[in-house]
Image (cartoon, rainbow, N blue to C red):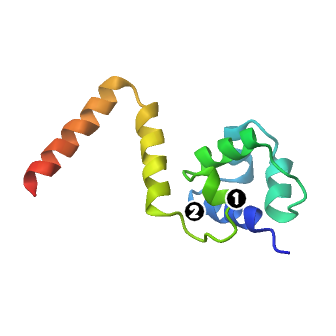
Amino acid sequence: MANLLGAKIKELRKKKGLTLEQLAEKIGSGKSYIWELENRGVKRPSAEKLTLIAKALDVTTEYLVNNEQTEPSQDMKREVFFRKFNGLNPEDQKKIMDIMDVWGKKS
């Protein structure tokens, strides 16, 4: 059985230009932990680790664990956007809302 979770993590990590060390640092783990996830598939990450990995790679945990999905759905992409948006300070959220208002008026 293929290590689909590991393959997804590796592909997404490389697309984001992250090294094993950088991803490991983002989730508070060691480089060897990420390498094992990607290459051996023997580790079963906890829900907490999966959430941290998904956040670091700008996807949802659902996408990572769903073996039927090879690309994030539009709903998943929206979820990631709103997760990032909600993590911004109120001033930056307002700037983004102002930009969206301007774009909306152009239509």
Depth-wise, is mark 2 or mark 1 nearer the camera?
1
Question: From the viewer's perspective, is 73 left or right of 43?
Answer: left
Residue at position x 67%, y 47% from top?
53
The residue under the point 41% across, 31% down is 88
Q: Residue at x 58, y 51 (%)?
A: 60
Whether residue 11 sits left or right of residue 105 in the image: it is right
* Residue 16 percent across, percent down from the top left: 56, 57
Instruction: Mark 2: give few (<14), some (14-19) or many (20+) Cα within 10 Å.
Output: few
- Quadrant hosting residue 38: bottom right
Left/right placement of residue 59 relative to residue 74 reads: right
| First-in-chain label (2 vs 1) | 2
Disc 1 marks a residue whose amino acid type is: Val
Q: Quadrant of the C terminus?
A: bottom left
Q: Find the residue positioned furthest to the right.
A: 42
Which mark is drawn over residue 92?
A: none
Query: What kind of residue is marked 2?
Result: Lys
Which quadrant is the N terminus positioned in? bottom right
Expressed as whole percent of the image width and height from the top left, the position of residue 36 reads: 86, 56
Q: Residue at x 67, y 63 (%)?
A: 66
Mark 2 to mark 1 CA distance (whole Å) = 18 Å
Q: What residue did someone put label 2 on?
A: 15
Residue highlighted by disc 1: 65
Q: Is residue 90 above or below residue 84?
A: above
